[in-house]
Image: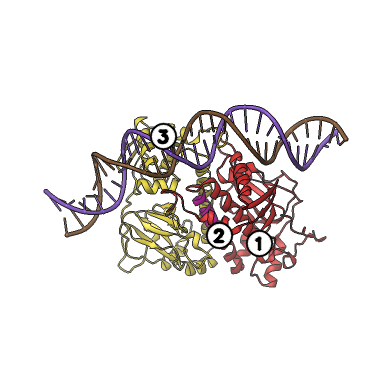
Chain colours: A red, B yellow, C brown, D purple
Amino acid sequence: MSLELPRCQSDNTTRCERCALHARCLPLGLELDALESFAAIIRNPRPLKRGEALVRQGDTFESLFVVRSGSLKQAVTQEGQRDQVTHFYLPGEIVGLDGIGEAHCYGSVMAMESTFVCELPFRRLEDLAEQLSELRGQIYRCMSRELRNDQRMMCLLSGRTADQRLASFMLGLSERFRARGFSPYRFHLSMSRSDIGSYLGLALETVSRVLTRFQQQSLVTVAGRELTINDIEALVALAEEGIGRHSGG
Amino acid sequence: MSLELPRCQSDNTTRCERCALHARCLPLGLELDALESFAAIIRNPRPLKRGEALVRQGDTFESLFVVRSGSLKQAVTQEGQRDQVTHFYLPGEIVGLDGIGEAHCYGSVMAMESTFVCELPFRRLEDLAEQLSELRGQIYRCMSRELRNDQRMMCLLSGRTADQRLASFMLGLSERFRARGFSPYRFHLSMSRSDIGSYLGLALETVSRVLTRFQQQSLVTVAGRELTINDIEALVALAEEGIGRHSGG
DNA sequence: AACCAGACTTGATTCGTATCAAGGAAAGGT
DNA sequence: ACCTTTCCTTGATACGAATCAAGTCTGGTT
């Protein structure tokens, strides 16, 4: 889960065209001069240590952030309830889309390991988008992609068993790593069992038990947070399998 | 759930400034001439009868739709599984935001009663948004509001009991009706128990049982699909209540 | 190197909700 | 108004996952 760390340019200017994530990031498809205007609004806050907050629930919403390296989790605190993990963010993914148009941030976002981000002050991004139709399109696309992801998540949370949730979760991570040029079969989980459980609506003990069972069934090999997928077809079959009357047919 | 039916202008031009939903619709905040340009791109398809599809899963994405009157549900069909209801749409709400930037529509959207919609061809909307920064802002706001709603839903689906899901669901509807000028205490459910169950990740029998129990506890009165909320504070308390270790504290 | 705190595993038990099953009520069509 | 279909309610039972409870492992700290 650790991309090559980005160079911090001495002039504090991010060079998107040289970034390893260029192909999967917000400014995708911008012409070179547009890219330069885009890069000019980027700020690079100091790197976050494991456990540090990038935004806190209730903070004034000002910026979007793109993960350059490392990973983060979003957690929502609700009235009298335990925190709930709502998103994990990997390199190239955008933090804060759910805060647009609101005065305050919806949840807290915290680094799960050493993490570098690019900060995009939203006002300036909006101004830029006024001139760059490609950028406008990209913002729309990113938001609607997230809407679809959330809906997939809702489908997962209602109606699927613990096994299927874990299978889908691992396949989802696998796919995201593949897309970023990492091995889709072997990767590091930067989140705890408890985070996974919270995200998937399961008790952490259940997460642990299911992973153990998957290992016994030779679907995966788990060594602490190192995960190896041994039988991806079986995982896919499991994730798609219908069960019972309510959740499938 | 039935707003005054909109007049179909004989010249087929929608007059947003006269629409009862104006205050809650996409063109909110547009100047009068901007509003006119906006209204010019609106198409009014023929009304949908109960059960008719507005879009089918896999259709080419071309337009957003705003509900003028009536109500719809979105349902997603997945590989070998039963359909899952992912959204209900009331007057003033926008259908199709999750299709932006995709070639095809994510789920099917079907009328739950006689329903009128305004169609907004997305290409033309985009062109218009290029000139109208207010409109751009509104589109962003609508999308990010939906992101937050989906996240609230994810929190509800992992970690809350059947009672709490139903309580939240009814409170959510109540609030949406209130915002539209209807009674927040007494309204018609245009969706079936089965739809509610699918949406909330519960078996339809559970929905029925919980409603019966809520009625015995004098929280609500249910007569078929007519719902009366008798004790909204108790519902709120129930919805916010923490349970156990995993879901609350 | 030893210690500590947090993270993880594993087992026993309980509980909520799905499932199966069947009867009753409402709604739509002719 | 009748019939048919779908929707809804209610009961009995089964099962998956949460909870409670130890104990083990791990990484970070001094």
Which of the numbered marks, if any, corresponds to residue B206? Answer: none
Q: Identify the subunit bearing mark 1.
A: A
Q: Is residue B141 magenta?
A: no
Q: Are marks 3 and 2 on the same chain?
A: no
- Secondary structure, magenta segment, majority class: helix
Span of residues in magenta: A146-156
Query: Which residue occupies the foreground of this view, B113 or A129?
Result: B113
Q: Earlier in the sequence, mark 1 or mark 2?
A: 2
Please name the amino acid that badge 1 sits on.
Answer: Arg
Q: CA distance from mark 1 to mark 2?
A: 18 Å
Is residue A148 toward the left or the right of residue A73 in the image? left
Which residue is label 2 attached to?
Answer: A145
Task: Estimate the x, y position of residue B128 in percent, counting from the top left.
Answer: 50, 67
Instruction: Note whether residue B141 is visible.
Output: no
- Give the foreground label among 1 and 2: 1
Disc 3 to disc 2, C-alpha distance:
36 Å
Front-most of D21 and A44?
A: D21
Q: Secondary structure at mark 1?
A: helix
- Amino acid at pointer 3: Ile
Position of D22 with respect to B167 (left or right) is right
- Closer to the eye: label 3 or 1: 1
| Residue under label 3 | B232
Tell me where residue B146 appears, x and y as whole percent: 50, 52
Q: Is residue B149 visible?
A: yes
Residue beneath the point at 57% across and 33% down? B245
Residue that label 1 marks: A178
Residue B114, placed above or below residue B229: below
